[in-house]
Amino acid sequence: VDNPSIANSTLPEEPMEEVEEHRAVAEDGPGVEDSVSGEGPGGNDEDAKQGDDEQSAFLEYLAALCEQWRTRGSDLSRTEAIKIWTGLRRKTQPLSSRLCEQLRLILQPMLATRLAGGFRTGKRLDMRAVITYVASGFRRDRIWMRRSKPAKRAYQVAVAIDNSASMRDSGAGAGALAALATLVNAFHQLEIGQIAVASFGADFKVLHSLDEAWSDDAGIRIVETFSFTSPVSGYVDAVEGVLDIFDSSKLSSRRLNLAGDVTPPVQQLAFFISDGRLDQNSRVELQRLSQRATTAEVLLVAIIIDKEGKDSLLNTQEVSFVGGQVRMKPYMEDYPFANYFRIADVTRLPETLTDALRQWFEVLQRQSQ
């Protein structure tokens, strides 16, 4: 290992397997042992106990990873990045599968790729309709099929992670990377469309563009770039950068449409993963950007990796001076994101996220009606 501090780390050992082999295991999905519940007396109790043990092991793994980031003094090497991404990928696989199945019910297919019958013209005959056509004396002539049945999703998703020092100090860095692994792998399984990943802090950096196909190699490269040492969060630049990416994509689609190459409309979603702490005097600008996103029909969701207890954002006060007087207010009051949720346990991410998305899509449907 390149960094001597890793040798003394309490991070659980993960087998150093090839990325291609790990990808094959992930695509096979859960094994038979995972899909069959315990039978007979006490079977459900044993399953519940096993689930609790797995959750405890996962949380211990994240705690060890947080401690490693606190004590390290240099950037990650390639070997360390492979080890961390492989561990996160493996341990978040149940969460990704859960999230994928729940999103399948919410994020409806948008692209018409399946054939449907009942047309007078088309490119393929519906043989069942042909029989009816002959039997009706050639009157029922809707015997052609077209690709008019939605069967494929066309979403553009951006995930941005805070790379500031506060993420390391609060222990939210490892939880943010676990949330990233859960999200992108669930989206990949769902074949949601295009996925972009970025980091923000002193600089906003696109680590994986919308045009690139997602792979484990991309995940390793992304983990390798995080140090959680930036002195500022740079939330404003992050939101503005993501919205610019989406605007550029929409502009490219319009140009293709004008050229005669029709592209279907896409739904754009952006997730910002951080400890929720904003730079001073950035709330007004973030509220303006949030309104810009609403106008552009882009969903912005802030995922706050928080703690329980006295260090939680819910128990934090913000101090300001108004008219020469000291004013204190809860930190989460007037939070600039309309859609946000805080989680202290990353294992609750699938249910929490799907509830938020379901509510947002219900609002959109009511507005369209």
Image (tube, rainbow, N blue to C red):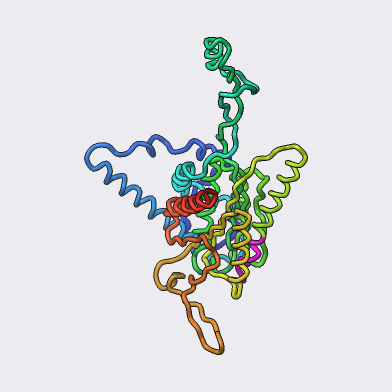
Residue 54 appears left or right of 295: left
As drawn, 118 above or below 226: above
345 left or right, relative to 245: left
The residue sitting at 52% across, 37% down in the picture is 27
In the image, the segment drawn in magenta is 232-240
Expressed as whole percent of the image width and height from the top left, the position of residue 312 reads: 44, 70
Residue positioned 57% across, 61% down in the render: 4
- Depth check: give the residue in front, 157 or 3: 157
Q: Position of residue 84 (x, y in %)?
A: 54, 53
Vertical placement of residue 113 versus 333, above or below: above
Q: Main secondary structure of the magenta part?
A: helix
- Indicate whether residue 280 is drawn in magenta: no
Mark yes or no: residue 234 visible: yes
Q: Nearer the viewer, residue 93 or 75?
A: 93
Quadrant position of residue 139: top right
Splitting the image into 4 quarters, where does residue 130 fall? top right
Q: Position of residue 99 (x, y in %)?
A: 46, 47
The residue positioned farthest toward the bottom in the image shown: 324
Foreground residue, 335 or 34? 335
Name of the residue lying farthest toward the left: 41
**Is residue 88 shown to the viewer in this render?**
no
Residue found 65% across the figure and 57% down from its top: 243
* Picture coordinates of residue 347, whole percent (x, y): 43, 54
Total label count?
0
Q: Residue at x 38, y 37 (%)?
A: 35
Q: Quadrant of the N terminus?
A: bottom right
